[in-house]
Amino acid sequence: MIKKNTPKERRIILKHADDPKYSNRIDCYLREGGYAMLKKSFKMKPEEIGEEVLQSGVRGRGGAGFPAGMKWKFLDRKSGKPIYLICNADESEPGTFKDRQIIHKDPHQLIEGMMIAAFAIQAKQAFIYIRAEFFEGAKILERAIEEAKKKGFCGDKILGSNYSCDLVVHRGAGAYICGEETGLIESLEGKRPNPRIKPPYFPAVLGLYQCPTIVNNVETLCNVKHVMEIGGKAFSEIGKPNNTGTRIWCVSGHVKKPGYYEFECGALTLGEMIYDVCGGLLPGRSLQAVIPGGSSSKILRADERFSGKLKDGTEFDWGVEDIPLDFDGPMAAGTMSGSGGIIVMDDSVDMVEAMANINAFYAHESCGQCTPCREGSLWMRKITKRMCDGGAREEDADLLLSVANQIEGRTICAFGEAAAWPTQSFIAKFRDHFEDKAKNPERKKSSLQLI
Amino acid sequence: MNLSEDTIEQIDQIIPKYPEKRSAALMIIHLIQDEIGAIDLEACEWIAEKLEVQPINIQELITFYPMLREKPWGKKHLRVCRTLPCALRGSYATCQSLEKKLGVKEGHVRDDGEYSLEFMECLADCGEGPVVMVDEQTYENVDAEKAGLLADLLLKGKLDDSKKFISYEQALVSESKTKASVKSKSSKK
Amino acid sequence: MISPKNGKVVPIVLDGKDVEVPEGINLVEAAALHGKEIPHYCYHPQLSVAGNCRMCLIEMGTPMRDRATGESILEDDGSPKIGWVPKPVIGCATNVSPGMHVKTESQKVLDCREGIMEFLLVNHPLDCPICDQAGECRLQEFATDYGRGYSRYVERKNVKPKRTRLGPRVTLDDERCILCSRCIRFCQEVPKDDVLGFVDRGSFSTLTCFPGRELNNNYSLNTVDICPVGALTSSDFRFKMRVWFLKESTSICQESSAGCNTTVSSREGEIFRITPRRNDHVNDSWMTDSGRELYKSVRSSERISSARIEEESTTSDAALLKAIQVLKGKSLGVIGSCKSSLEEQHLLAQIAKKTKAKQFLRGHFGEDDGILLSADRTPNLRGALITGLTKTYPKDHLSALSLAIEKKQVDAIIVVGEDLLDSKVDQALLSNIPVVFIGTHENSTSRIAQVVIPSLTVFEKSGTFVNRAFFAQAFKQVVPGPAGVLPDLNILARILNGLVEDSEQSADINQIWEEMSRVRNSVLKEVSFSQLKKAPVLLNGSKWAELPFVEKDALHYQSSGKIKVKG
């Protein structure tokens, strides 16, 4: 688990994550210069902090990639209602495990980032919604908050100023839909986490208890601290234009050295990540497919080519290995970087079974509020399960695609797209596997059971 | 329903942290479930009264979330991740190995109530799959063979002290380690 | 709530046509106003918007404007370029705004509807042959209009509890439930009795009541009305009759002065059920459960089916003649009823006036629930005030009558429907004077009356009730009365003509309305029954504003505040 810094990594957020001498207690954090940015920010005006974050161009690291500074600008500050800040630590996207490292190993970074953000938006109270499976993580955070409170870094009259903001750790209970921002807000209110319809319930206007609320990912809020340290303009020069800062990529699946790696945006390509940083595939295997951004993103077939024009006008002609790892690169290739969870699949994988595994995940996690996702995700799971149990028919590929097309765009929240995109992309790129399943229902000897 | 004074005190401390009482529901349910193992109908009504909502509002939550239970799990509860990244590294074989060794099918509690097994969705540690959680400890890279060894140690009650299986939580750097290293640093000067 | 605000209108473009719609309404209502149906399940105009069935998906766009200059962007042919929202939007949650473009019939919208219909039917059991909702089921209707027409589903359907008892009057079939959440929102928002909820999640979500509790409030059957499918059914109506055999007639609930608008369903002279009718000013789309039970009184064992003279059965004509004979020339006491229609009360008031009789009236009172069961348990107390049947607010007893009989001011009485023993009138006093009873059901007075003339229930005649907010509402005949029973208007007109010289009172309802509206300073001026049959009319009740009305604030009703409200 303890890894050396691999070449070309730039560890800003995970600077101390693998340091055997770095503990998650406050004295260690203070020794390394912690909470200095909080003190600096409190000498500024809240709007100035917002401007720095906007200028830095930091985009949400939770999956949507929406610029955080702009999200803060949408906040309704005129309503007179209290403002809330929520940290989305409900990391449930399959393939993603970066927030775990931050919470367990360097929690004070998150607390400092949150307090700076809370001050910037003048929040009345801040919450950390952490998934319940992080038992130790919740305890670590609560202990860290107590330590920070004692030193005046959060809670009442922070740093002796007039600004008070209490930080509460709220545990979830094992639902993926609580990662959706309005689902999270409903869960925090103590109700079933059914996402809300937008419009009119945009969190920046009508969020927690119908008050303006900002929901940000753990990594995004940590970046706020580093933006204040490096400076908004300097931060925007890290990485590429519109893809600023560093990103933590989590690689899993059939590579020699899976794990978490932090790189500047666009500093390396997908091929360099898989073959250089992660040591390549297991011996004797070749690449079959890669899912670049958590299971909700569209899959990439190993022999695919992508060409077109980027936003800045440059033309590109890429193979899968050439896709740069930032926000816009995967998007140009027709997929998305999502939460940064790269899942590598080699040629031993039965794609229909992989699809069945993913469909079972979405069917299990659907909240059941709106018709297309509720019925469609379960239907897709039943089809792929039947296909893997030997009952595949030739028309199943078309049926799956049609069902997925009927879900996309018609649901209350983005879970519909998250459930539909894998199916659409698997059928688009591996249709031959699905059509073959009717003729060859048995699993290949070399492949693992996935459903 | 008999709750310990300690739990009731903790509950009474949590409720005022939230602007609205109902928000404390999940935290209170966790506390009660940790003590008595599950939330039965009586507990639902008690919680509902405490938070000034209807019992159906609490039951809606208990049945929605997989980690909240109406019937308790076993004394030791194991969770195996079944989602794609862990499945790609053999978590199905891991689960079957544990089923055999512990004598309980996934999703069930063993007849004597000692062990239960849950094959659940992504536990957010995909790089070190297959991931097995035993109560609150997360064990990584547990393939089918290692799962057998883990089960053996668990059955003998020797898992916590084992050097072969260090959980993610146990491996976190502790304060004593840093103090020791700081001492050695300063003594070197 | 979709009452349009302040009468302003907003121009939108609906399927290419420029139309004007009231401000503040959503697109489902706007399209309905122009004859276009946008199918929906979870939306209800009187409940909060949930937006979860996704059936009302439509395309929406707004004219594009240049970000820098604010000028409209134009197409090549000069028409404004429309920025269509890439994903379809739900009509029920989108309020109209000026310049909005809406497509309700494009290929994309039709595809959406087909898709949603298919998803709804995927786990829906094939229960139509045994389901009460058949014939008035929105799944059936929209599947026919917007569905694909065939099924592609070959997997196993989900199994859930069937025919569970949700409460004493409601039966639940979870497999049929499409999880629209109308019933849950209703229970939270109208009777404010939060007992229903969804348990489990995803496609296994199940509607349920907390074990040990039940859906028992006095508005539980409204959930059956608003359930778009046959998941919630009335235990009383279950398996009784197919809805396409039922004739629907409009009526008014006579349980209290709330005056809920109802639809009474009958077949071949037998009533099968009562359901509420929508009236945005009186009862929204709701009514009480207790009000629905009232149709059972039509065929109850206590019904008076034939006239009696001194306990001998006879014809109504003979009984009328005997009644006139018994009453003529005496000092009469007229005991009217707040349950009579406005026209009947007018005739009774005429009898009293022209025979210089003393008038007595009692009220029936109970607990006000603040919604649709008012404290005044009679439908037409205000009618009695308007027609002059009483000048003061009635008490809940008739001890004044006892006094009048003792003092020999009254030596013969006509009783319309009331139970005098229950009204604290001394039975011994009644045995000394002739009593003529006109009513529908036996009670202590009918058993001792000299002449008993049977009359018709509300369901068997037409008339008008004036509710607590002074709305005059007409009810129409639903089923014919028992053979040989005369309508109340006939009975009263003939008594009047028999008791008064040269009286030629007509029993025709329109004629009676002419007379009523001609009364000096009447609030019924310029109102006719044919007008009432089309829509209720709000009367001016200011004349009686100082009276101690017992009703409390309730749905669509502000009490006059004369009575001190306890607690």
Image (cartoon, rainbow, N blue to C red):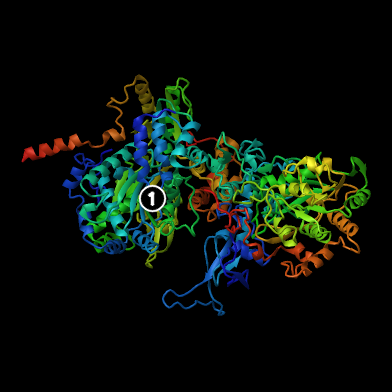
User: Toward the viewer: A449 or B186?
Assistant: B186
Q: Nearer the viewer, residue B17 or C415?
A: C415
Q: Residue A16's quadrant in the figure?
A: top left
Residue A73 point in image, percent of width and height: 36, 63
Please give the chain letter of the residue carrying mark 1. A
Is residue A262 left or right of C179 when viewed as pictured?
left
Looking at the picture, how far across and down is residue C51, in whole percent? Answer: 55, 54
Furthest residue to the left? B189
Relative to C324, does residue B171 appear above or below in the rendering? above
Look at the image and tell me in which quarter the C terminus of chain B lies: top left
**Is A260 displayed left or right of C343 in the figure?**
left
**In the figure, is residue C29 to the left or right of A270?**
right
Q: Residue C261 lies in what quarter of the image? A: bottom right
Q: Is residue B113 left or right of residue C409?
A: left
Q: Position of residue A407 (x, y in %)?
A: 55, 52
Q: Nearer the viewer, residue C170 or A145?
A: C170
C284 or A122: nearer the eye? C284
Question: Farthest front residue?
Answer: C407
Q: Residues within 10 Å of mark 1 (few under 14, many from 20)?
A: many
Whether residue C154 is visible: no
In the rendered image, residue C533, in percent from the top left (x then y), is placed at: 77, 62
Mark 1 = which residue? A339
Residue reaching furthest to the bottom:
C78
Name the secondary structure under disc 1. loop
Q: Residue at x 46, y 38 (%)?
A: B49
